[in-house]
Image (cartoon, helix red, strand yellow):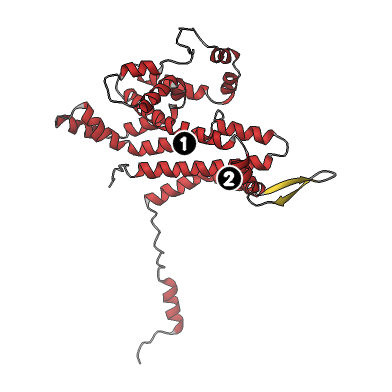
Amino acid sequence: MTNTPTIKQSAAKKQSAPKKEAPRKIISLDKKKARAGWLFVLPFVIGFLVIYLPVIIDSIRYSFCEIKTLQGGGFRLNFVGLENYKEALTEDPDFVRILISGIKQLVFDIPAIVIFSLFMAVLLNKKMFGRAAFRAIFFVPVILSTGLIASIDASNIFNSHMDGIGGIDDGSGSSGVTEIVEMADISWLFSNMAIGTELMTYVTDVVNNIYNIINRSGVQMLIFLAGLQSISPAIYESASIDGATGWETFWKITFPMVSPMILVNAIYTVIDSFTAESNSVMQYIDQVYQKGGQQVVSTAMSWVYFIIVLLMIGLVSGLLSAYIFYQKRD
């Protein structure tokens, strides 16, 4: 007789055999960082979906309707298509003019703010006595220009009076307390250079607007500082050994390495300028909203303004992305 295992013996062997554990899924570091990032922005995502998204949908709906007040209270929305947008762009006498003026001002402000913040970040990144104090001093205007302090400064009667007076009459026909230099000064400075009047006008406006530029450069300065401190000192040591000058080191090493930060700061400056309370377009839209029966028109103006902001961000991103250097990391 052959020893053939019975059915019970086979079942017992199967039960006594050790079970193979399922292989564990190894999560990569990139996936862990991605999960941590989503966890970090989760409160904003929830708040956007619950609070902001319904408001945005209602705002879009109102921009295509007119409001009819009902007897006894309440209102009814009547769809009118693009009539509100037509009124904002063609019938309103001031909206397009103020919008174009704001865009022109932004085109001049972006280079001035980015260049100034990069220049100051390079200086503040040098090893010197009191470096932390100097960094804090340049960031103080950012704190002072927000919240309650900004409201107090906006209602400062003394500043309003100083802005309104004409200054000392020197016989030239015009003088102002807030002007640091005049066109004649810049013309004399650049008298031996072949420079057009447009550039001299731009330099004059930048110098006279230096206080506002410093106030709006604090965050950009910190971003540039973070980018400068992420550059390995070994790169500068290698350049120094090869005999590179400070000018060559800046344009061949520093500037390419912080070019991603230039793109970030340019986009941040566009958004910050377009959404500031002192923005003339924002103030005009608020004035139209306060008028009786003009709420839907102001909503249409807001969406036109929002689309222009997106186009400006896309234009800035497209122009700067072609010159951005991204360091490859293994």
Of all residues, the one furthest to the left in this rendering is: 242
Point out residue 265 in the picture as x, y percentages from the top left corner. 41, 35
Point out residue 5 in the picture as x, y percentages from the top left corner. 40, 84
* Whether label 2 touches label 1, CB < 8 Å: no
Q: Residue at x 18, y 32 (%)?
A: 239
Q: Is residue 165 left or right of residue 121?
A: right
Q: Nearer the viewer, residue 24 or 320?
A: 320
Point out residue 106 in the picture as x, y percentages from the top left corner. 46, 33
Task: Examine the rendering and report whether any part of residue 5 can be seen.
Answer: yes
Q: Residue at x 48, y 22 (%)?
A: 141
Label 2 amino acid? Phe
Q: Residue at x 47, y 23 (%)?
A: 212
Q: Quadrant of residue 259?
A: top left
Callout 1 environment at 10 Å: few (<14), some (14 to 19), or many (20+)? many
Assign a secondary structure to mark 2: helix
* Residue bearing the label numbered 1: 270
Q: Is residue 229 above or below residue 127?
A: below
Q: Nearer the viewer, residue 22 or 274?
A: 274
Q: Quadrant of residue 51?
A: top right
First-in-chain label (2 vs 1): 2
Real-space Cα distance between discs 2 and 1? 22 Å
Which disc number belongs to residue 2?
none
Quadrant in the picture for the N terminus: bottom left
* Residue bearing the label numbered 2: 48
